Amino acid sequence: MRVRLLAWYDREGRTLPWRIRPEERAAGRVADPYAVWLSEIMLQQTTVPHAAPYYAKFLFLWPTVHDLAKAPREDVMAAWAGLGYYARARNLHACAQVVSQDLAGVFPCDLEGLRALPGIGEYTAHAIRAAAFNLPASVVDANVERVITRVFRIETPLPSAKPQIRKAAAGLAYPDRPGDYAQAIMDLGAVVCTPRAPSCGACPWESHCAARAAGDQERYPVKAVKKARPVRHGLAFVVFRGSGEAREVLVRTRPDKGLLGGMLEVPGTDWLEDASALPLPELAAPARLDWREAGAVIHVFTHFELRLTVFAASVDAEAEAETPDGMRWVGVHPIRAAGLPTVMKKAVQAAL
């Protein structure tokens, strides 16, 4: 099975900006651990097409781990905006500082050392060890879970099946070409063994796949029945200053802990499950202004759906006195508003 997979990868494996292809490795090229780490953090909960532009932007802004470590955290958070799961950005910056300041810019290659770094868990440690250092590791992401559950026709639902999947995956991992094997099995799940309509005829493991033999490959991985996603409600207040290209919006920084921690937001209320418990808009607004209801936005997070009622108001361009404590003005122009997470960009757009 290993030989078949690696032969397929040598022919069909994806070319990615952070990846060392087999022919490059054979020619003596080695991976940049900083680039591999950066890509792996970005690819958590994110697809390759979505992450690739951010990867290029981060390397342009901060070519080395020392550059990233010295960058102001608010700049890193702004550059991350739109990638989601913002704790990753905070941990990314914290990890860069540890590697730069405590480890002289050198990423550890052992699993224990990697897991000790901020934001690096079991999967990411194995992925970095394999891809960056070409050392034995067993990488299990969502793509690998799908492959393994189909090959072995694992009936236990996720997430309970994870220990069984990890054990099976570790038994297949290839110690002689660990970096290529790890990326090969992830590619197999990403481009062949897809969630729907897998391309079984192109799969190097077709003859070994128990689910394929049974004809029920799309049934796997078996997943526990999901609970209905809860809904939360809130009010958002968008205050504009100026006009045209110079228009600005009033924002504040969210607390570090919690959802969207450390990111910018327009002022608003807490997000409550009971919409009737929200305060009256005139009492919750950050200033006494001529507010208008600008509509509503819906944003789906992993664990709940958020429904924001948006109110908008404007102040004079010279209204510095209108800036409440703890808030500041940022440009509305798309380039300068890049630090706003998606849900807040939606609120600003609704108010325009």
Image (spheres, rainbow, N blue to C red):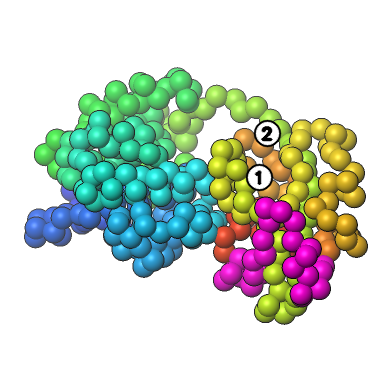
Q: CA distance from mark 2 to mark 1?
A: 9 Å
Observer-nearest residue: 256 or 20?
256
Q: Amino acid at mark 1?
A: Val
Q: Position of residue 256 (x, y in %)?
A: 55, 42
The reply to whether residue 13 is in sight is: no
Q: Position of residue 227 (x, y in %)?
A: 65, 27
Q: Quadrant of the N terminus?
A: top left
Observer-nearest residue: 225 or 243?
243
Residue pushed farthest left? 27
Task: Answer whether labels 2 and 1 touch (C-beta < 8 Å).
Answer: yes
Sequence-wise, which precedes: disc 2 or disc 1?
A: 2
Q: Amino acid at mark 2?
A: Arg
Residue 247 within the segment the image draws in magenta? no
The residue singled out by tag 1 in the image is 300
Q: Residue at x 71, y 33 (%)?
A: 230
On screen, 231 above or below 58? above
